[in-house]
Image: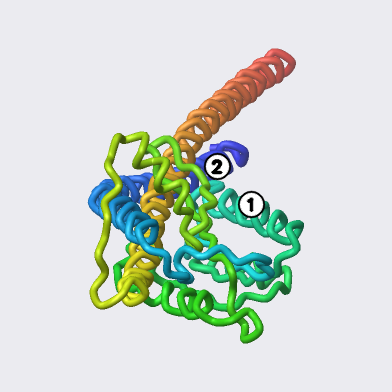
Amino acid sequence: MGAQAKVYKRRIKSVSATKKITKAMEMIAASRVVKAQRRVAASTPYATELTRAVGAVAKGSTTQHALTTESENPTRAAVLLITSDRGLAGGYSSNVIKAAEELTERLIREGKEVDAYIVGRKGVAYYSFRERKVTESWGGFTDSPTYADAKKVAGPLIEAVLKDTAEGGVDELHIVFTEFVSMLTQTPVQDRLLPLSLQGTAEQQEKKGEILPLFDFEPSAEDVLDALLPRYVEARIYNALLQAAASKHAATRRAMKSATDNADELIKSLTRLANAARQADITQEISEIVGGASALADASAGSD
């Protein structure tokens, strides 16, 4: 076998090994995204109904509370960015980071300082490389988040909302994550968690034809809202973490399938080149044999 054919054979072997890895990763991501999708489907109704209930309770009271009260002159906002701990997911992390950058620029144009809170090592690496301040970060659980992880993330955010801005608190809480729409579509989302928009909640209920209830609060409206605030933030963050995890697995599956398909095409191309090189080697060997036989015949005729 000629040198060129050997080179093609080595490349085919290398690409085939890579294909096995990407195919295995595709299958793993496919199994994980199904489980993650089920968890999203189970948590989304709870988060939606809790948001509706909190909005209804807040609408039925006149208490000034951090959950619902808009600051007259907001000067500081917290942005929670949810990315991935790992790569190999196409543009998943870069797309949600881009959405967070757009939100941050908009808040700065509105005259607000922005505190960055980040979930996922990819987001932390992005901010670290650009030497930008991160108020707090978390990682190690983005592939399979639990409610305990959501509580861990929500704690410092709730504390910042309840603090006065002069003491390092914030007037608004925003979240940026990737919403799982389908296996083929995952969309970066910018959402404001606090203060809760009561007008939007009421409009949604009116569109559904729901009758807004009247509430009596025991022991008081403020105590009820104090109890609901952490539950609301935790549930919304938990749902966002699950949505992001499902989106990441779907993006990984799609990226690995594309890599596997590309490996197939490359193997086919290299096989054609290897066959052509081998054919060229065979043709050259035949030519050399024929040439040698012709030379021997000429030599024999000359000696006669």
Quadrant including the C terminus: top right
Residue 148 drawn at (x, y percent):
31, 74
Residue 25 drawn at (x, y percent):
37, 51
Is residue 86 in sight in this rendering?
A: no
Q: Nearer the viewer, residue 210 or 35?
A: 210
Name the residue located 71 percent from the left edge and 72 percent from the top edge: 132
Q: Is 132 positioned to the left or the right of 252 in the image? A: right
Q: Nearer the viewer, residue 300 or 184?
A: 184
Give the amino acid type for the residue marked by disc 1 in the picture.
Answer: Lys
Residue 140 drawn at (x, y percent):
42, 72
Task: Point out the tag, 1 or 2, that comes first from the N-terminus.
Answer: 2
Task: Check residue 6 in the rendering and tell me which mark sits there, or answer none.
Answer: 2
Question: What crowding class fits label 1: few (fewer than 14 Cα within 10 Å), some (14-19), or many (20 or more)?
Answer: few
Front disc: 1 or 2? 1
Is the C-beta separation of discs 1 and 2 under 8 Å?
no
Give the amino acid type for the residue marked by disc 2 in the picture.
Answer: Lys
> Is 189 rendered above or below residue 162?
above
Label 1 secondary element:
helix
Is residue 288 in sight in this rendering?
A: yes
> Is 267 rendered above or below residue 76?
above
Q: Is 35 positioned to the left or the right of 206 in the image? A: left
